Amino acid sequence: MKRALILAVVLALLVLWLQREFGRGSFDAVERPFVAWLAANATSPARIPPLTLVLYDDETSELSGKSHMSVLDAALFTRAALRLGAAAAGVEGLRGNPVRMMEAAGGMPVFGGYAPDASPQEGWTPLPGRAVARWPEMGGLTGNSDAFSRGFIAVPADKAGPRKLQMVARNTGHPIPSFLALGWAAAQGWRAGDLKAMDDRVSGPSEEIPVGSDGEVFFFPSSAVQKMTLNELLVIAEEFERSGGKSPVHGRILALASATADVMRFSREGAAPVISPELWAQAWEPLRSGRLFVVAGGWFAPTLWLAACALALGVARASRRTALLAWMIAIMVFLLAALGAYAGSRLFFPLAPAWIALSAAAVLGRIFR
C-alpha cells in the first residue's frame, strides 16, 4: 500500500510537470506533426481557396496621404480583386460606410470587420444580415511564459508554438463570429443567415468549427502566406487589364488589413487587441486543412494521472513481456482516443505528456514491484 501511494505521488508530480512544460511550448516539435497527423486522418480538407494578404502599409499610407484605410481604398482594393478574378475580398478595420466597396464588388462576395478602436455597433458585414464582424484576438504561447501574449510576435512560423485565435467573441452579450469566420463563410459562398455563431462552435450548412469555452481555437502557424501591398495589387490589376496574362490571385481570397507602424504595436491595457495581420493570415492554411483545434481542458491531466496509475499497478503484477504488451496497448488506446476526439470535436490530446507519463508508469511499475 505504501509503495502504491509513493507511486501515485510520483506520477502526480510528473503529470503536473508535463502539463506545465506543455503550456510553455517545450513539446511543440512533437505536437506540431501530431496535429498534422490527426488532421490528415480525422478530418476532410475544407474546399475553400487559399488566401492572399494585402497590406495597407506605411508606404501606401504615405502615398495616399492618409494614416489609415479609407472607404476609397477599400473600393479600389475590391475593384482590383474583381478584375483579377479573386473568389472573395475582405477588409479588416475599415472606417466608414462600405457602400462604395459593395458597389465595386460587382457581385463578388465581400466581407469585413470594424476598426480596432470602434465599437461593435459600428461593425458591418456585406453578407446580408446584422453586423457581426470584429477585430480578432490572438495570442501565442512562448517558451518563456505560461501566459498568452498579445501583439506582434516575431517567431518563424514553422518553429512557432500554437497560437490562440478568438473565433467567437461575446463582447456584445451574444456570440458573434470573428473576421476569420466571416472569411471562411464567404469562401464557401454562404450568406449571413447560413453562418451561426454559438458558444461551442461556428457552423454553416455543410460544416462546422468547434471552439473552446472562451470562443477560441488553437493552431500551429503556417509559413505559406502569400502577401503583397495594396499598391502592388493595384499595379498588378492595371497591368492585367491592359495586357492580360495570368492573374496571380485568380480564385483566391483577398484580405486587406492595416500594417502601418501605429497598428503594429502591442495593445494597451483595456484597449482593443491589435495583432500582426500576417499572424492572422497564418491561420488560414490550418483552417483549410482541418488543423484548427481545441486543447483538452483541466480534466485531461487528472485522467492521464489515473490512467498512468492503473498502468503502473497492472505492470507491477505482470511479467516483463505482459508489461511491454500493456504499455503498447495503453499507447494505442491513447492514439485511438485522440483520433476519435479530434474527428468528433477537434479536441486535441497532447501527445508528449501522454507518451512520457504512460512510459514512466510502465517503468516505475516494474521498479516498485
Image: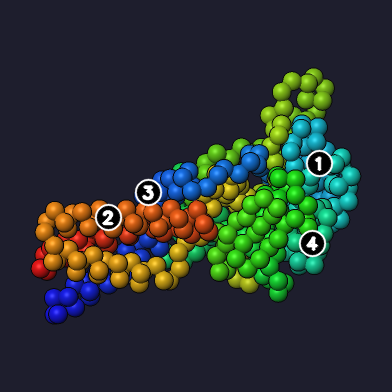
3 or 4: tag closer to the N-terminus:
3
| CB atoms of marks 1 and 2 within 8 Å | no
1 or 2: tag closer to the N-terminus:
1
2 or 4: tag closer to the N-terminus:
4
Q: Nearer the viewer, residue 326 or 196?
A: 326
Q: In the image, which disc is placed on residue 108?
A: 1
| CB atoms of marks 1 and 4 within 8 Å | no
Q: In the image, which disc is placed on residue 131?
A: 4
Horizontally, is 323 left or right of 245 in the view? left
The three-letter amino acid code for the residue at tag 3 is Ala
User: Against 121, is 182 above or below?
Assistant: above
Dot 3 falls on a residue whose secondary structure is: helix
Residue 288 visible? The answer is yes
Q: Residues within 10 Å of mark 3 (few under 14, many from 20)?
A: some
Dot 4 falls on a residue whose secondary structure is: loop
Q: Residues within 10 Å of mark 1 (few under 14, many from 20)?
A: some
User: Against 58, is 26 above or below?
Assistant: below
Q: Nearer the viewer, residue 252 or 234?
A: 252
The three-letter amino acid code for the residue at tag 1 is Met
Q: In the image, which disc is placed on residue 329?
A: 2
3 or 2: tag closer to the N-terminus:
3
The three-letter amino acid code for the residue at tag 2 is Ile
Dot 1 falls on a residue whose secondary structure is: loop
3 or 1: tag closer to the N-terminus:
3
- The CA distance from mark 2 to mark 4 is 51 Å
The mark tally for this picture is: 4
Dot 2 falls on a residue whose secondary structure is: helix
